[in-house]
Image (spheres, coloured by chain):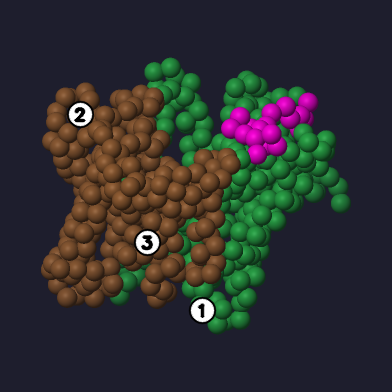
């Protein structure tokens, strides 16, 4: 049981980390609460299903195509729907909710509401320190680790990353320093949706794929982001790991655990917020007046 | 005073206060339509949709008081709706309370829950508050599912008595409760209390500096908003003769957000208008066999398109087209008037007057 908890917690934690970092990035840079974030993750999983199972393309090719097309779609949606109403915070919020509903319904029309399975990219079980891990889950870990490292390099070791961090820190000053804030925001949307799409593609073989698969991770991502602190990358990763392990412990150790897993993880978030309202690693944002 | 005199005076009041402004005339026409609907169209399907519309209108208006006026953007408003629905259903089924008492106690329990959530949320602001509130109804769903013998599990509770014997009676219960709640909220939001809520939303620090105990006001608003949503939930449970987990779902919380923003924030009448347009629209689309399955898609596209053209919401946009504000006394005037109806100041500057 301990092994199950260790592996499940690590795998779901790293998936949540991929999703949460993207969400946190969009929020930090563009102040967009992107409710559709996990809907893109759902779309990527369906893209993989369509290309791999229905289209018969190879695993790598269909995965890459799914990620690229979902990323392009997100940038198009941003230009067409979000940018015209950027000034109105509430309108942006429900625009993203409406986008998520549109994706959900479109997928429901095309693929139907039944649960779909995607075959694993690699079969078999690996043994690591005496713990048996299915290779697909190991692959998720590797992909997530690589993406997280890549994001860190991009944000902290490139000029573009500097621009992103500067915009997140102070939009107006970044604009005055000659950064094209709108383009930075658009690129951030693309990057964060790409992270979500990678998460969707890599977990699709482990979970089942259905049109409502975006709701549960959305709630977890919000909890993660709040737990770790909005706008903090390492906070998001640690928050995701905490939530992943709390869920794993609940499922394996408590009776009726599968029903309570969300409730326990969310209660945990509420408790953290009561003790530290700005999250574990959050920067207490100066009140915007 | 003779009845004829009283009637004449009432008519004069009505003409002077209500018919002078297009928005008020529309509101009066809407009240008349809500009250007369069963006499004109006693069709059971129409009455059922209309009653649900009324219940959700009260729910959406209560979200607006919290999110629009006070700025506490609640992503988990379904918590209060579901608490009202489940507690009144449990009280009637398990403890044998009569329907009306169950609805009232359901509202009270929901108020208590609202005060609790409000207390927890005092420390949070902005997006943190939204994300944290999203969690509360899901925590409750998890607890309900873990005790299926008590709560009915995923199927929910059923077998409740309706509040009135006849179909038309049931409609009038929903419509009457909605009118009382909505106009109550409207009057409340227009009072001094509502002004303080605006102040808290715009600048909480400044409000505190002006001697307003913002914590107490925020708690009170959570309580009031939860009470209205809870009563709406309890009415829903008795109207549907049962309460299920759908009353707590994230989808319902997001519906409240969509109705509120689509109609126009901080207006009370905005969300009500949105519900009265969008809910019957989706139900009507659902009645077609070909579109039926597309109704949520069409709903989302309509919301998106309307927002692209009216980002502040539907009712503020319409209101700006129908009415202008007097620059001197700040009173609303019909858009076609040239001078203010109260202080006679010119509403539009003609070319010659500007020197």
Quarter location, residue A24: bottom left
How far is mark 1 from mark 2, CA to CA?
Answer: 58 Å
How far is mark 3 from mark 1, CA to CA?
Answer: 36 Å
User: Comparing marks 3 and 2, which lies closer to the viewer?
Assistant: 3
Percent x, y for residue B253?
51, 46
**Circles 3 and 1: CB distance less than 8 Å?**
no
Q: Chain of mark 1?
A: B
Quarter location, residue A59: top left
Quarter location, residue B115: bottom right
In the picture, the disc for residue B206 is 1
In the picture, the disc for residue A238 is 3
Percent x, y for residue B289?
43, 17
- Which residue is at a point 67% across and 37% down the rendered structure image? B151
Which residues fall within the magenta stretch? B147-165
- Which residue is at a point 33% across and 47% down the rendered structure image? A130
Q: Nearer the viewer, residue B146 or B98?
A: B146
Report which residue position mark 2 lands on.
Answer: A52
Q: Secondary structure at mark 2?
A: helix
């Amino acid at each position: 049981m301990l092994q199950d908890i260790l592996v499940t917690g690590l795998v779901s934690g790293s998936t949540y980390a991929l999703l949460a970092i993207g969400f946190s990035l969009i929020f930090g840079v563009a102040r967009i609460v992107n409710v559709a974030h996990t809907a893109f993750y759902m779309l990527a999983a369906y893209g993989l299903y369509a290309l791999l199972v229905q289209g018969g393309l190879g695993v790598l090719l269909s995965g890459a195509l799914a990620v690229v097309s979902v990323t392009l779609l997100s940038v198009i949606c941003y230009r067409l729907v979000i940018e015209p109403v950027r000034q109105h915070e509430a309108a942006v919020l429900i625009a993203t909710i409406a986008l998520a509903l549109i994706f959900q319904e479109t997928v429901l029309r095309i693929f139907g509401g039944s649960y779909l399975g995607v075959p694993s990219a690699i079969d078999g079980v690996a043994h690591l320190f005496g713990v048996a891990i299915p290779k697909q889950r190991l692959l998720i870990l590797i992909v997530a680790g690589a993406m997280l490292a890549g994001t860190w390099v991009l944000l902290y070791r490139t000029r573009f990353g500097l621009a992103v961090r500067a915009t997140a820190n102070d939009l107006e000053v970044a604009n005055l320093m000659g950064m094209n804030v709108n383009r930075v925001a658009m690129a951030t949307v693309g990057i964060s949706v790409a992270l979500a799409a990678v998460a969707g593609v890599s977990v699709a073989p482990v979970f089942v794929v259905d049109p409502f698969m975006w709701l549960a991770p959305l709630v977890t991502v919000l909890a993660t982001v709040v737990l770790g602190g909005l706008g903090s990358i390492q906070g998001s990763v640690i928050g995701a790991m905490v939530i992943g392990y709390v869920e794993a412990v609940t499922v394996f150790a408590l009776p009726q655990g599968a029903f309570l897993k969300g409730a326990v993880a969310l209660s945990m978030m509420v408790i953290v917020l009561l003790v530290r309202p700005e999250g574990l690693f959050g920067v207490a944002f100066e009140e915007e007046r | 005073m003779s009845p004829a005199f009283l009637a004449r005076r009432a008519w004069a009041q009505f003409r002077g206060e209500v018919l002078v402004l297009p928005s008020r005339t529309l509101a009066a026409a809407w009240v008349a339509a809500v009250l007369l609907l069963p006499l004109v169209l006693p069709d059971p399907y129409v009455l059922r949709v209309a009653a649900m519309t009324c219940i959700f209108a009260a729910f959406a208006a209560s979200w607006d008081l919290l999110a629009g006026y006070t700025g506490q953007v609640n992503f988990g408003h379904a918590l209060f709706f579901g608490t009202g629905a489940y507690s009144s259903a449990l009280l009637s089924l398990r403890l044998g309370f009569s329907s009306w008492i169950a609805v009232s106690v359901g509202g009270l329990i929901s108020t208590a829950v609202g005060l609790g959530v409000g207390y927890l949320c005092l420390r949070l602001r902005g997006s943190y508050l939204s994300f944290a509130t999203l969690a509360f109804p899901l925590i409750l769903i998890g607890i309900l599912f873990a005790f299926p013998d008590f709560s009915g599990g995923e199927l929910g509770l059923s077998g409740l008595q309706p509040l009135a014997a006849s179909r038309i009676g049931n409609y009038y219960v929903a419509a009457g409760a909605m009118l009382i709640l909505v106009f109550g909220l409207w009057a409340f939001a227009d009072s001094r209390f509502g002004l303080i809520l605006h102040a808290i939303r715009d600048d909480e620090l400044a409000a505190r500096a002006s001697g307003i105990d913002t914590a107490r006001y925020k708690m009170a608003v959570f309580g009031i908003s939860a009470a209205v949503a809870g009563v709406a939930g309890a009415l829903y449970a008795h109207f549907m003769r049962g309460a299920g987990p759908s009353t707590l779902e994230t989808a319902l919380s997001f519906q409240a957000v969509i109705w509120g923003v689509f109609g126009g924030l901080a207006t009370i009448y905005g969300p009500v208008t949105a519900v009265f347009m969008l809910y019957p629209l989706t139900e009507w689309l659902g009645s077609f066999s070909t579109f039926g399955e597309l109704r949520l898609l069409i709903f989302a596209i309509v919301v998106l398109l309307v927002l692209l053209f009216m980002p502040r919401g539907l009712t503020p946009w319409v209101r700006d087209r129908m009415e202008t504000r007097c620059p001197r006394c700040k009173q609303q005037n019909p858009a076609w008037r040239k001078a203010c109806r109260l202080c006679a100041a010119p509403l539009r500057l003609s070319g010659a007057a500007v020197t």
